[in-house]
Amino acid sequence: MNRLRMLTGGESHGPKLTTILEGLPAGLPLNRASIDEMLRRRQHGFGRGGRQRIEHDTVEVTGGLRNGRTLGSPLVMHVENRDWANWSEVMDPWEVDQSKAGERSVTRPRPGHADYSGGVATDQLEDQRNVLERASARETAARVAAGAVCCQLLERFGIEMRSAVLALGSHTILEGAPTWEDLAGVDPASPLVTPRPNDEEPLVEAVRSVRDEGETLGGVVGLVVRGMPPGLGSYVHWDRKLDGCLAQAITSIPSVKAVALGEGLEVSRRVGSLAHDPFILGENGLERTSNYAGGLEGGVTNGSDLVLRAFFKPISTLRRGLPSVDLETGEPGNTVWERSDVTAIGAAPVILESMAALILADALLETLGGQAIADVDTSWETYCARVARWWTPKQKFQ
Ligand code: EPS
């Protein structure tokens, strides 16, 4: 990212998670309820573990904001870990209660988690809790706080998002890349946040059945962004191409093992004439008869809806355990289960929105420049005027 920087800190069972988001223009009004609403959506979903009954994630801001407007200084946000109260003796930053630490220590790495690989990297294999506390997907709460802020910046310029669970395990609700209209029916309060809330019962049943077997499930999540102007990103350098930046941000979400841009998976099996999006001159300027590219060509937005899918592996903490080796004794043994989600797929749509919003807000600010929101607004008007012959914004900002 060239304009924004996001850093998160904190462990899953530490006192709190912290996000620092730097590079926002000064004077941007922020709505606290919208941030809390996205944090609430991240806690949602049928199949989540007991932790979500303990936590009530809300944002606390300690820097970079005054009277509801950004100051241009780093925005510092926190999300409290209520579960800290149950872990303070073994997670104390200065002095861990050694009589209790042993029963919480982890010596058999869970396949699929960072326990082994992260333990090797940081020489912490003797107690992999030192790794898993940070590698836990709880960290996504800190990302969602930043993503929610970025969404508010994008909304100012008429850029909106829709996201949903498209598949859970082998149950597919929506095949292929979603369109904006496909995701119109999403009810964020439905058990599994699919585009067809009335058809979710078999999915709920699937979660119940794998839960009874001590198993876990992953799935596919789709995102459509409407209102992105053409010309954001760059075709010039590999590390500035927007498709590459989005793919990096999205594959960094815990459990994501693949990402598809537009109909990237499907077009790989077609001939060229059925894989690209013809231009036509329509009523609203330059239009396309399809959107296989998912709004990105050459690493640059093309004015079509931005479409992507993320593929989540099943949660790697299984109640039934997975074969492992105790690295202290060298003895084989199954992984230990404490508590975990059967599936966290219900949380995935808002996490996907958040990471995409971060990258897209960065791209927008890079193109528009400006340290004051008034200058960003002026630059937006100039930009829209320049591309007006080809593209019209969905809505004008106030
Ligand atoms: C999570 C909190 C964690 C896990 C889950 C996500 O809490 P705990 O470890 O206390 O149960 O439920 O983390 C993982 C899925 C993972 O693989 O680490 C949360 O708040 O999202």
Image (cartoon, rainbow, N blue to C red):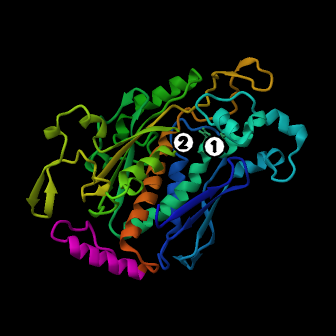
197 relative to 318, above or below:
below
Q: Secondary structure at mark 1?
A: helix
| Disc 2 CB within 8 Å of nearest ligand 1 atom | yes
Using the image, tell me which numbered label, if any, was put on residue 254.
Answer: 2
Specify start and end residues of the magenta stretch as a single range.
374-398
Q: Amino acid type of disc 2?
A: Pro
Q: Tell me the residue at 82%/44% (across/down).
A: 90
Kindly tell me whether mark 1's CB lies below 8 Å from ligand 1.
Answer: yes
Instruction: Name the one closer to the observer, 22 or 374.
Output: 22
Q: Quadrant of residue 161?
A: bottom left
* Residue 215 relative to residue 294: left or right: right
Disc 2 crowd, CA 10 A, few/some/many (<14, 14-19, 20+)? many
Disc 2, SS: loop
Residue 321 vs residue 200: left or right?
Answer: right
Tell whether label 2 touches label 1 (CB within 8 Å): yes
User: In this rendering, would 17 be left or right of 189?
Assistant: right
- Compared across the picture, whether 97 is left or right of 303 comes to right
Residue extending furthest front?
237
Where's residue 17, x and y in %?
Answer: 65, 56
Q: Residues within 10 Å of mark 1 (few under 14, many from 20)?
A: some
Q: Is residue 392 magenta?
A: yes
Residue that sits furthest to the right in the current view: 99
**The quadrant where residue 320 appears:** top right
Q: Tell me how far mark 1 sits from mark 2, CA to CA.
A: 8 Å
Pick the residue in front: 321 or 292.
292
Residue position marked by numbered label 1 in the rendering: 135
Ligand 1 located in image quadrant = top right
Q: Determine whether 171 is above or below 146 in the image.
A: above
